[in-house]
């Protein structure tokens, strides 16, 4: 009877470690994507800062900063969608409302 208990304990602990490894791979992937995106955005903002200091046309600087912002919004929107996809419809409505407000917040100041 003691042998049966040790066998069940082994299988339970091995399934927990497998689940933990799967989660850590997924989290590491998201962390890695976030880190490299931050690096790319920092480089774009740095280039924009240097060009602005050198007196280059402001449209180029604004375009670089807009590109950096768009990259961040795309990645965050994708991760947000992965979070709410299995949830109720209310969450999806809230997601699209947030997305529309963000897009309006970017486009309206450019037009005015």
Image: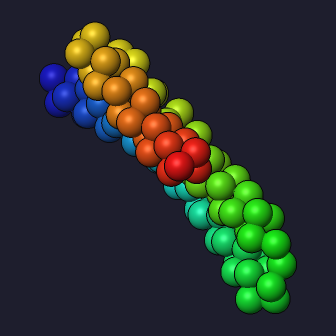
Tell me where residue 55 sits by quadrant.
Answer: bottom right
Query: Is residue 102 shown to the viewer in this render?
Result: yes
Using the image as rendered, state which of residue 30 and residue 67 is in the foreground: 67
Q: Residue furthest bottom?
A: 53
Q: Position of residue 110 (x, y in %)?
A: 58, 50
Query: Is residue 7 shown to the viewer in this render?
Result: no
Q: What is the tally of numbered marks visible in this picture? A: 0
Q: Position of residue 30 (x, y in %)?
A: 53, 47
How did the renderer colour the structure? rainbow
Q: Residue furthest top?
A: 89
Tell me where residue 13 sits by quadrant.
Answer: top left
Q: Residue furthest front?
A: 112
Residue at the image point whose x is 43% and y is 32% from the top = 99
Q: Position of residue 78 (x, y in %)?
A: 53, 33
Using the image as rendered, state which of residue 1 and residue 109 is in the foreground: 109
Q: Is residue 85 left or right of residue 112?
A: left
**Relative to 33, residue 92 above or below:** above
Residue at the image point whose x is 65% and y is 55% from the top = 66
Q: Residue furthest left?
A: 1
Residue at the image point whose x is 40% and y is 18% from the top = 85
Using the image as rendered, state which of residue 110 and residue 11 is in the foreground: 110
Q: Position of residue 111 (x, y in %)?
A: 58, 45
Using the image as rendered, state which of residue 30 and residue 10 is in the foreground: 30
**Relative to 37, residue 30 above or below:** above
Q: Is residue 78 left or right of residue 46?
A: left
**Relative to 53, residue 46 above or below:** above
Q: Is residue 63 left or right of residue 97?
A: right
Residue at the image point whose x is 80% and y is 64% from the top = 60
Q: Is residue 89 left or right of residue 109?
A: left
**Relative to 56, residue 22 above or below:** above
Which quadrant, please, contains the N terminus?
top left
């Amino acid at each position: 009877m003691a042998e049966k208990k040790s066998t069940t304990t082994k299988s339970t602990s091995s399934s927990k470690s497998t689940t933990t490894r799967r989660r850590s791979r997924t989290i590491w992937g998201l962390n890695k994507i976030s880190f490299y995106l931050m690096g790319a955005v920092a480089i774009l903002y740095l280039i924009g800062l240097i060009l602005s200091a050198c007196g280059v046309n402001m449209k180029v600087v604004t375009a670089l900063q807009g590109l950096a912002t768009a990259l961040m919004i795309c990645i965050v929107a994708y991760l947000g969608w992965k979070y709410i996809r299995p949830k109720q419809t209310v969450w999806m409505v809230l997601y699209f409302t947030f997305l529309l407000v963000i897009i309006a917040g970017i486009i309206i100041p450019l037009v005015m």
